[in-house]
Every structure is written in C-alpha cells, then in structure tokens.
Image (cartoon, grey):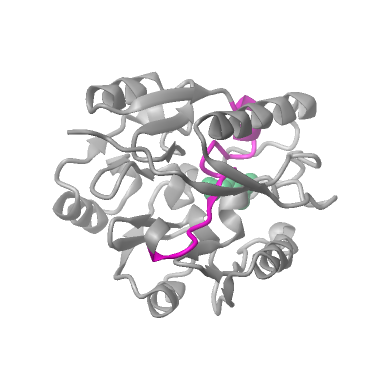
Amino acid sequence: MTMDAIRQRFLMCRPTYFAVDYAINPWMDPTAPVDADLAIRQWEQLRRTYLDLGHEVDLIEPVAGLPDMVFAANGGTVIDGRAMAVQFRDPQRADEAPAYRAWFEGAGFEMYDPKHVNEGEGDVLLAGDHLLAGTGFRTAHASHAQLQEIFGYPVITMQLVDPRFYHLDTALTVLDERTVAYLPEAFSPGSRAVLRRLFPDAIHATMADAEVLGLNAVSDGRHVVLPAQATDLAAKLRDRGYETIGIDLSELRKAGGGPKCCTLRLRQGKASK
Ligand code: ARG
C-alpha cells in the first residue's frame, strides 16, 4: 500500500500571551511554573515541521489576555469552504470566538454561527465520510445536529468519559480516510462499540501514550506529527507504515494541549477535503 501525503492548509496562533492562569481542565495548575519563552520555541518547531513537510500555515494574530488562543483547533470547524464558528463552555475563552470568526470571514469562508456550546475541531473530526463529534465535557450534544445540517456529513456522537481527555482530539486521532487511533477507555461502552464497527482496523493507544497527549496528533496521510513522549504509539504507527515526527510541547501540555490543539485544518473545498 502506498501512503500519499496530502498537502494541508493549517491555521495556527503564536503563543505570545500563553500562560496557565486559570484551570478549566485537569492538566491546568495555575500554581505550577510555565516557561513562556520555551513554549514559543516549541510552537515554532511545530510550525517549522509543517512547513518542512510542504504544508501551508496561516497565522492569526494572538490577542493579549487570551492565553489559550494558541489552541487554534478550538477556533472553528472548517470543511468544504464552510466555517462554523465556536461557542466556548468557559467564559475565560469566550473572546477567542469572535477573533477566530473574524479571521475566517476575512479569509473568505462561508460563515455559520453555533447555537450551542461547540469547541470546533477540538471535538469535531472528519474521518473519511463521517464527522466524529465529541460530547460529555465541552461541545454540547445539541450542536451535533447543527454540524450535520451545516456540513452534510453523517455525524457520529462520541461520548467522552474521562475528564483528562475532555476534547475528542485528546482521545482520538484521524490518520487517513480509513484509519484512526484512539484510547478505548476514554469512551463510553456504546461509543467504543461504534468505533469498533466503523474502524475495525483502528490502532488502540495505551493509557501511557494518552497521558502524554500522544493522541493529539496531526496526520497528512503519511507523516504523523505527535508528542515526542508518545513512544509506543509512534512505534505502532511506524508498523503501519506511517512516518512519525515527535515534537516536544511540554509547556503547552501544562494547559492540556498538544500538536493537534495548536493546529486547525482549513479545508478549502471538496477537492482538498
Ligand atoms: N486549556 C485549553 C482548554 O482547556 C486547552 C485546549 C486544548 N485544545 C484541544 N483542541 N484539545 O480549553
């Protein structure tokens, strides 16, 4: 089987104002030290990796006072030239939503506004012809129906059950049109059964991999960029023929984020789906 890399267009946000000064997930400890300069260098390394792989990276201007804005995956869901804006659960992140919305509008995407809490690609992952949509901690179940109406892909609800894996993209990663990797324990029994049915060949990650946010990975169909500490997962991916690239995002992990959280996929139109 030949594995073709698909050239991607990503949106990222430099962690200029990154900090951990509130706690909205179990990873965040506002009393623990964060090296802000190191966070920027690690993020630069991620951006450089994408550019070296031939991907396109657009940048949104960071806003002072929004320390989590670096997590661009939460800025929206963008598929086939349509962008659905977000509505955050927590007031600390609320002002990120209009900033991202304005960027999408300026970039020429067709805009849709959320009617319920929806944290974008953090909880909404396109896997082949299905939209996998997480709920349980952040994105409201009610928003799944709206996702289906806007994008016209069948939406599959994924019930998340472990607060450490509060966004779908911390528990599952899409590797290509047919393959995903996930942590079974992060999902309800029913959701696990659905995952087995849809993806019988899926890679099962270990808790050790998930605990370093190893599933917060970005794949172009051939290369998988993932946290350097997720060594077992990387080995399993290589066994399946993927090329793995480990990135150390230790500082951003203190906010509960990894490579995927920092990366929003911009899908122009059907051809570049
Ligand atoms: N501190 C951020 C939050 O809790 C981290 C977001 C991580 N983003 C993601 N796509 N999982 O909202």
Q: Could you tell me what secondary structure mostly forms the magenta stretch?
A: loop
* Camera-side residue of 134 and 246: 246
- The quadrant in which the N terminus is found is top left
- Quarter of the image holding residue 259? top right
- Residue at 70% x, 63% y is 103
Residue occupying image coordinates x 64% and y 39%: 255
Horizontal relation, residue 26 to residue 148: left or right:
right
Q: Which residues are magenta?
A: 249-270
Q: Is 47 on the left-hand or right-hand side of 163? A: right
Q: Note whether 114 is above or below 66 in the view shown.
A: below
Front-lying residue, 161 or 214 = 214
Query: Is residue 253 on the magenta stretch?
Result: yes
Does 235 sit above or below residue 76?
above
- Residue pushed farthest right? 64
Nearer to the camera, 174 or 156: 174
The quarter in which the C terminus is drawn is bottom left
User: In the image, residue 152 lies at what x, y percent?
Assistant: 35, 75
Left or right of residue 179, residue 79 in this image:
right
Q: Residue 74: where, in percent of width, then height? A: 58, 55
Q: Residue at x 57, y 62 (%)?
A: 76
Is residue 5 covered in magenta?
A: no
Q: Tell me, yes or no, if residue 140 can be seen here.
A: yes
Say which residue appears at 39% left-offset and 31% top-offset: 223
Q: Is residue 227 left or right of residue 196?
A: right
| Place of residue 146 in the rendered image (x, y in percent of width and height, measured from the top left) | 44, 78
